[in-house]
Image (cartoon, helix red, strand yellow):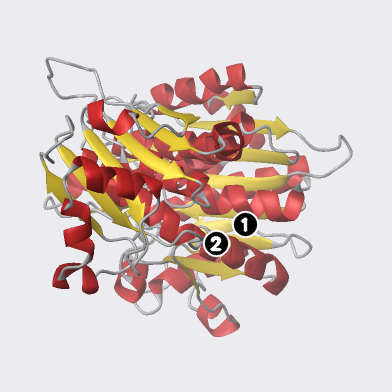
Amino acid sequence: MSSLVPIRFQAFELDLMAQAQGRVAILIPADGKMNPAARRANRLTRGAVARLVESDRFAKVKTGDVISLAWPGGMEAEALDILVLPRRPEPDEARKGGAALAKLAGGKDLLVMAGNQVRTEELALGIALRSYDFDAHKTKDDDAKGAVTICHAKPEDAEAAFAPLYAVADGVRMTRDLTNEPANILTTTEFANRLKEMEELGLKVEVLDEDKLAELGMRTLLSVGQGSDSPSKVVVMQWNGGDADDAPLALVGKGVVFDTGGISIKPAAGMEEMTMDMGGAGVVAGTMRALAKRKAKANVVGLVGLVENMPSGSATRPGDVVKSMKGDTVEIINTDAEGRLVLCDVMWYAQERFNPVGMIDLATLTGAIIIGLGHENAGVFSNNDTFCDAFLKAARAEDEGAWRMPLGQAYDDLLKSRIADMKNVGGRPAGSITAAQFLQRFVKEETPWIHLDIAGVASVAAETSYAPKGATGWGVRALSRFVQDNFE
């Protein structure tokens, strides 16, 4: 498991700049007006900062840009980073500015001279998010990583504002760790054990084994994992931070720890990436961690279905018919459309047991959503405009891309089966929509529901503003904000 970069706040002291090791960052707005830290850096470097501000290069800068002066004279630091940032930035501007500083720091010590900068807590969040590095399986000589010190005019206030954001960053870290972890390490059992450890944060965590799942009638979920030696499980995490009488919000995650496609086996090229097919369960886990660590005043239950989809003599075959926990029968056309079979049973169980005020499921469900939206936005499907709009607002506030997609009877009709109540796929056209239509059949009419197809955003091949390439942790910040704005 990785750890968050340590970030501490201390009183604003200009004298720290000359002797600081690693990197020193100052903040200058695009108009070039220098604050006390910039003026001190300018004196230490014998006018280098002023010459930069007056240069043609600085005239072309944009908010969030960082210009570095290597080995600045008069300072012991290896670099002086000038972050272009207005004194009152928008939250995403501050976050991206912090992320840019963290990327340049590369794990070395970083001193940020924030002074009386507004939204320093958001800048610190950007640093925490972009400092992430998954190196658990690399041989290394030194595990020590640099620390971040933020000098602020009111350090206690800045630290208090940052504390809940740091908790959310830790949830993002957990999601990234789980999503990056190889499948021989993150088995269904290991996944469940890591979630069970969160009881120390105040979560109530239950692990339902295969015997219990069979007793409950979760036959579609069990059908996915029956070809694997790794036992299928459902983990239920409860955070009870609200009133005892309040119904919880339910978060449901697909946790396929490795997906070969089963008998409908995937092509070999790129199959190693299917370690991330538990990304939805990873987001649910990270969100529950964030809510517990920031002591959210809301009731939220997180449920994840953990399975491995493998081909074997006992694996489910194309053409098999399986009865869901709800009682509907499903003709399995393609065993590689397995995530919806996991989710439908867990979603039905969540509604039957908890009668939630609303339900959100998350899954790396379809390649089709990547064709439609690329890696910039998750697909959002919902049966309730008010519920959906509230989530989209939270996602925008946290700069996490999300785009609403349609639902409709014509799409649902594509799931008709000759021999069962439904098929598990509706063909190539509108593949992400028919997958959502399948899930909607397991949503009670009175339950506000959102389906998030995160196949394109859970893990990416190129770095993003807030993360190196690999797992992004998309969704933890948006869901935490959604809970904060609507249920606390």
Which residue was labeled with disc 2? Answer: 397
In this image, 59 relative to 120: left or right? left
Q: Amino acid at mark 2?
A: Ala
Which SS class for mark 1? Answer: loop
Which SS class for mark 2? Answer: helix
Determine the residue positioned at 75% across, 44% down.
248
Task: Decide which of 418, 344 is in the foreground and name it.
Answer: 344
Which residue was labeled with disc 1? Answer: 328
What's the distance in space between the residues labelled 1 and 2, CA to CA? 39 Å
Q: Amino acid at mark 1?
A: Asp
Q: Position of residue 4 (x, y in %)?
A: 39, 29
As drawn, 17 above or below 31: above
Determine the residue positioned at 47% across, 59% down.
87
Q: Are marks 1 and 2 in contact (CB under 8 Å)?
A: no
Q: Earlier in the sequence, mark 1 or mark 2?
A: 1
In this image, 74 relative to 254: left or right? left
Location of the N terminus by quadrant is top left
As drawn, 384 above or below 217: below
Q: Does residue 100 appear anywhere in the picture?
A: yes
Determine the residue positioned at 67% across, 43% down.
349
Label 1 CA crowd tier, 10 Å (few <14, some 14–19, many 20+): few
Task: Decide which of 487, 54 is in the foreground and name it.
Answer: 54
Q: Position of residue 175 (x, y in %)?
A: 42, 38
